[in-house]
Image: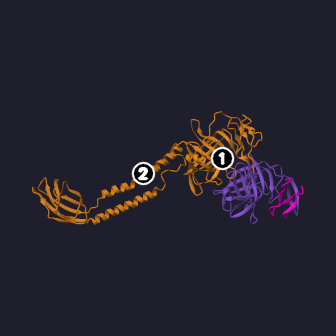
Amino acid sequence: VIPKLSGLNCPSCGAALEIRSFGNALTVVCPKCLAVLDAKDPNLRILQEARSREKIPPLIPLGSRGTLSGVQYEAIGFQVRTVGEPDDSYQWREYLLFNPYHGFRYLTEYNGHWNFVRTIQALPEPVSARRVRYEGESFTRISGGEAGTSYVIGEFPWQVRVGEMVQVQDYIHPPRLLSSESTADETVWSLGTYMAGAEIWKAFALPGAPLSAVGVFENQPSPYPADTGGLWKMAALLIVAALLLTAIASALGGRGDVYSQSLALTNAPVVTPPFEVGGFTSNLQIVTVNRGTESVYIRYSLIDQKTGLATTFGRDVYREDTARVPSVAPGRYYIRAEADRYPASVDMSVRRGVPSMGFFWITALLLLAPPAVRSWRRLGFERRRWQENS
Amino acid sequence: MTGANCPNCGAPVHLMWSGAVQTTCPYCRSILVRRDVNLEKVGEVADLPPDSSPLQIASEGTYGGKTFVVVGRILYEYEQGAWNEWHIIFSDGKSGWLSDAQAEYAVSFLTTPPAPLPDANAIQRGAAFTWDSTRYEISVITRAHYKGVEGDLPFEYWDKHEAVFADLRSYDARFATIDYSQTPTVLYLGAAVDFETLKLKNLRQFEGWAP
């Protein structure tokens, strides 16, 4: 059994120190006084005096253990990293996790957004100025800059110093995030997977509840699924079906000319002989063509011969007019026509089952609404992702 | 010959691998080299620094569908830590290396390069090579210190000081190492592996951790 190193004290402040990663630790930073110490030196030689006394408590206390992806890890190091100029910068927090068999992992946190990260041994393939390929997926560059270590406590298997700078680049394929960190000597790539704060709280059995995440993070998965294509396809299918139904309805409605007559209108109403209206209940269209040069106002009554019930409506006819009487049951009808100006001469024709495209268009709009709304929201989410992180 | 006595302390020395050219005496830490049927002491291993590899001599695992056993190792140290090259012997007798650098694992095999390898002072980061129709790029050049050996090795390896290694990566998880610690320079080709996939047995234990 490899024993834990024990009985260590900070040479700067005397506080008891714990080394949790056995012989892997290269640097240890005293959580009490923030002095940077050489973990390989039996006397823990001081490598860098504390730059500040201000303490930043990690959300996951050092020494806590949690299970991620089925493996137990212990939080052993914590750093705050800063990108950008002092007046325009942002900070994220990084937790170093350790398991003596599985090695090192990281948890990063920014505005309540978490990533579970591991370094990768493959080299992502550059495919364009903004894209790299890794494990068959294309990752798009979203941010980059010079990152500095602004606060650090705990132990690290590398040389860590406050103020140290590296070049970082982030590429996304949500929920995965590829990051490169470059120094003069080496570029290290790592792969992060987005996690919600609640998952971290559960994994490490942390007290209370995590702060809710603010904004949209680089690789946060969209709550609006990517496959709006399916929704669009469904809408298109339903629209085709509605079109077919409209055609079938008009065919079954006994589509066609029912009756036509030239009307010579005088001061007395003109009454047509009864005519047969077939099919089933659907609309009836009355087309009037004015053969004169002045407009004429015609009062039409469509009268059911059996019941005597009349549908009465008036039309101003300049050259040609189409009136539509909805829901006319099959049966025998006749028409009474009366003009406000006479004499007048018009050609009247009655047609059955003319498809009402209005209903079809309303149906089509309703069917298109869900995919349109979904796509709109998804686009909005993506816009925020790029606005807030680029 | 798999059993003999240490010419230094007389303790029985058992070779785990019949092809071993060099081994160490587990009792007096003498480095022993095979000369015909005898073992000759060529040096002594200094105290190995405490390292934290979960592997040890006689650990077993699986790679590429074959089982292997750990028979020896070379330990290196550099300014960013230390790593072990564990010498592994597969069930079919093939010899390979399992490297463990802070629990990042990789398996590799000695390979004959199709063209001569460049000199150590002629290489730089980003330089690309194609071996076995895979493109490799130098990702880091490390100057390491040889810290010691243990167990059975396929060649004589002792009396080393500083060594230069070029690590190369590919677009998949394959990797290569150009090893300048030997003359002529040698090439290892292999792949990074996850701890889980190695299905390791007979590992060391760590205080406070379940194996």
Pointer 2 local density, CA inside 10 Å: few below 14, some 14–19, many at least 20 = few
- Horizontal and vertical percent for residue B35? 88, 61
**Residue A356 visible:** yes
Left or right of A344 on screen, residue A253: right
Give the labeled residue for mark 2: A373
Q: Nearer the viewer, residue B206 or B173?
A: B206
Classify A278 as above or below B7: below
Give the color of chain A as drawn.
Answer: orange
**Residue A293 visible:** no
- Tell me the distance, in whole angstroms, between the alpha carbons under discs 1 and 2: 44 Å
Classify B189 as above or below B76: below
Q: Main structural element of the magenta stretch: helix, strand or loop? A: loop
Residue B87 covered by magenta stretch = no
Q: Amino acid at mark 2?
A: Val
Give the labeled residue for mark 1: A74
Residue at screen point 42% across, 51% down: A373
Give the color of chain B as drawn.
Answer: purple
